[in-house]
Amino acid sequence: MNGVKESGMTVIVTTYVVYLVISISLTIWVSQTLFKNGRAFLVDVFHGNGGLADSVNHLLVVGFYLINLGYISLALKLGYEIDNVRQGIEALSWKVGLVLLVLGGMHFFNLLIFARMRRRATLHDAPPPVMPDGFTAVREGVRQ
């Protein structure tokens, strides 16, 4: 009976290790991709100020790591027993799938933040609004 318990424990530990390796590797890959490709966008948002763009980009990456690695750590525990390799693979698939969803969500959140930053920057540089070319009289107290 002890051999069966040790075998199950080995499957659980192996599942945890594989989960951590895959999840952390995916987080690093996505983070590096965002850092590399986000720089040009941030330089545009900050009107060519590369130093400011690099600083903001670095801070975004740090936040990305903290959120995703925190989630990976919290999601490590399975909450149920794994008795064989098939169950270990199924648990691993579920956990890595959740990590991918979180990474995707964070990616789109970063894109949303970048888009808002860019929109604000372009509004700042936009030409002033056109002066009105007509006048509409308003009669007070009259409802239509």
Image (cartoon, rainbow, N blue to C red):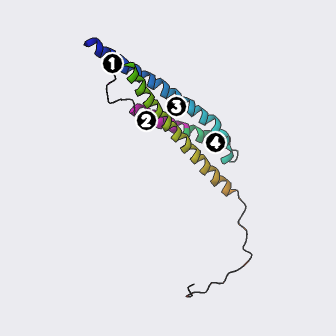
Within 10 Å of the Cα at label 3, are there few (<14), some (14-19), or many (20+) other Cα atoms?
A: many
Q: Quadrant of residue 17?
A: top left
What type is the residue that disc 3 sits on? Thr
Report the magenta stretch's main SS.
helix
**Image spot of residue 134 (x, y percent):** 73, 78
For mark 3, what is the residue?
27
Query: Where residue 135 sits in the image (x, y, percent)?
Result: 70, 80
State if disc 4 and disc 3 touch (CB < 8 Å): no
Q: Distance between the residues labelled 3 and 1?
A: 27 Å
Identify the image quadrant of the N terminus.
Answer: top left
Residue at the spot of label 4: 53
Which numbered disc flags the more N-terminal residue, 3 or 1?
1
Which stretch did the figure color magenta? 61-81
Local packing at callout 4 (Cα closer than 10 Å; few below 14, some 14-19, many 20+) is many
Disc 1 versus disc 4: distance between alpha carbons? 48 Å
Q: What element carries label 2?
A: helix
Circle 1 is placed at which residue position?
9
Q: Name the residue under label 2.
A: 71
Dot 1: element: helix
State the image coordinates of residue 54 (x, y, percent, origin top left).
62, 39
